[in-house]
Image (cartoon, rainbow, N blue to C red):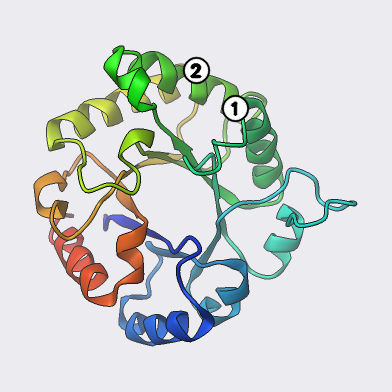
Amino acid sequence: MEKIIVCNQKMFLTYDEAKVLMNELKDENNENFIVAPNFLNMKLFKDFNLCAQNCHYENAGARTGEVSPYHLSLVGVKYVLLGHSERREVEDDYLINKKVVSATKNSLIPILCIGETYLDNQMHRTSEVLKKQLKIALTSVDKDSIFYVAYEPRWLIGGKNTLTKNEIEDSVKYIKKILTELGFKNNKILYGGSVNKSNIDLILSNNVDGYLLGNASCNIDELKYIINCIKSVK
């Protein structure tokens, strides 16, 4: 099976910049290539597998500045990023859980981001943190629900360093173990955490279902290099 690639464009691209990128990516468009533009640029990528960068947990209401998971599903969005490290600065596991439950009920596939902080890592609490995040975020989620889990060490986001291939594989193996214990089977495990042109060759693994890209997904040359590297591993 081909690796899954999720391109989180965050808040980097203007409409014109996103249009140029979209035209360059037409040949890469397939079921395993997922694009998460900002909301203003979503229409540009309507022919791709669309992913929202966030959503509210309610379907409708007086929620100024928020976006409904129900409304997202109506306009053809298939995936939604939830619990991203940058969102976790203002959201806790219980709020993320509400969003995951709501997303699955609205036929969206959550890409649940989990990961430890630098302090957690230094205190050897990574396993404890990941288990807690998974247990809370997946509370009351139907066991047959389809979702992805993206492991992204929070302390590496936006930097130049990443984990080693062995470290990534160990964490992915642990996440799969926890999901099995919780009774979930319809899931994929991705890795994110400053994946870029400089390190992608070093971290490619048959044991990882795909990769969540951030900054690197906004530079066409870097993105195409990463895509070609990932394609080499089936």
Quarter of the image with the N terminus is bottom left
Q: The disc labelled 2 sits on which kind of residue?
A: Lys
Q: Quadrant of residue 117?
A: top left
Asked whether the viewer can see residue 30, the reply is yes
Q: Position of residue 110 (x, y in %)?
A: 55, 46
Residues under numbered marks 1 and 2 in contact, where contact means CB atoms less than 8 Å apart: yes
Per the model, the C-alpha gap separating discs 1 and 2 is: 9 Å
Dot 2: what SS? helix
In the rendered image, which residue does mark 1 sit on?
Answer: 93
Q: Residue at x 72, y 47 (%)?
A: 56
Seen in the image, is 178 located left or right of residue 169? Answer: right
Q: Quadrant of residue 151?
A: top left
Give the percent coordinates (x, y) of residue 207: 21, 39
Q: Which residue is mark 2?
A: 132
Amino acid bearing label 1:
Asp
- Secondary element under disc 1, as helix, strand or loop, is helix
**Going 21% across and 41% down the picture, which residue do you hit?**
162
> Which residue does the image show at 59% across and 27% down from the upper left?
93
Q: Can you give x and y, in whole percent of width and height, for residue 232 in the image?
A: 13, 61
Q: Residue at x 63, y 39 (%)?
A: 100
> Can you see residue 138?
no
| In the depicted structure, whether residue 177 falls above or below residue 221 | above
Q: Residues within 10 Å of mark 2 (few under 14, many from 20)?
A: some
